[in-house]
Image (cartoon, rainbow, N blue to C red):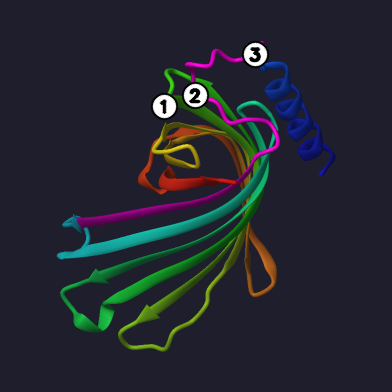
Amino acid sequence: MKKVLMIFTVLLHGAISAQESPQDNNNFQIDKGIWSIEGDVSFNYGKSENLQNYIGESTGYGFAISPKVGYTLNNNLILGLGFDYAHTSRETEREDPSDNSTNKTDHYGIFPYIKKYFPLSKKLALHVQAETRYTKYKPSIENASAEVTTSMESHELFIGLRPGISYSLSKNILMQANIGALGYNSGKSERDGEDYAKGNSFEFSLKSSNLYFGIVWLI
């Protein structure tokens, strides 16, 4: 926990230090003292076929929603707190229908964040969100010949950056896209109340689960 707090403090200091001198009035700007309410959504769909071990195919989809509330500490610098929920499902069909299965996972997360905007024009800006995100995963497996069973529970901590782009639709409404994630992941899985697996990684990801579109309301 001390390492997490230290990294988050460094990110906050870096974001504040990056503040520029007073903004050009022709540039994108969110003024100090403004509250922001955000809502992001993500959706993905995929289909694959495996001919190595059996003739069959898998079809899956996933969606995520992420509400956030923040406060502008300085021009174009927001400190906030976010929550997210995500659901993924994958159905696998095999030659023998009794071997068909459905894997589902629900994700619940919470994350404090710092978001810095870098103006490109009066209405357009790049942004970088630094965050510390805790996520809990609850998977379940349903076989054609068995009842639904919850096999494991997983926990993940992410510390890193999420880049994106924002466009001002009006004085109080922004449209944004968050693209990818760069940072450190630490995860642990439990089965029947006992540790099952652990892992750590540092990576840059552009997968669809890290692609969010949303609206920001400034008040």
On the image, the x and y values in percent for residue 57 come to: 19, 63
In the rendered structure, which segment of residues is drawn in magenta?
21-48
Return the residue at label 2. Answer: 28
The three-letter code of the residue at mark 1 reads Lys
Label 3: state its secondary structure: loop
Return the residue at label 3. Answer: 22
Label 1: state its secondary structure: loop
Q: Residues within 10 Å of mark 2 (few under 14, many from 20)?
A: many
On the image, the x and y values in percent for residue 85 come to: 52, 62
Tell me if I can see residue 152 in this picture.
Answer: yes
Q: Residues within 10 Å of mark 3 (few under 14, many from 20)?
A: few
- Residues marked 1 and 2 touching at CB (< 8 Å): yes
Q: Is residue 129 above or below residue 51?
A: above
Q: Residue at x 64, y 39 (%)?
A: 131
Q: Residue furthest right?
A: 2
Q: Looking at the rendering, in which quadrant would you find the N terminus?
A: top right
The three-letter code of the residue at mark 2 reads Phe
> Disc 1 to disc 3, how far (Cα)?
17 Å
On the image, the x and y values in percent for residue 206 come to: 39, 36
Where residue 191 sits, quadrant-wise, is bottom right
Q: Is residue 18 above or below residue 192?
A: above
- Residues marked 1 and 3 touching at CB (< 8 Å): no
* Upstream in sequence: badge 2 or badge 3: 3
Q: Is residue 204 above or below residue 189?
A: above
On the image, the x and y values in percent for residue 52 come to: 20, 55
22 drawn magenta: yes
> Disc 1 to disc 2, how far (Cα)?
5 Å
Q: Residue at x 75, y 31 (%)?
A: 7
- Pick the residue in front: 73 or 137: 73
Return the residue at label 1. Answer: 123
The three-letter code of the residue at mark 3 reads Pro
> Disc 2 to disc 3, how far (Cα)?
12 Å
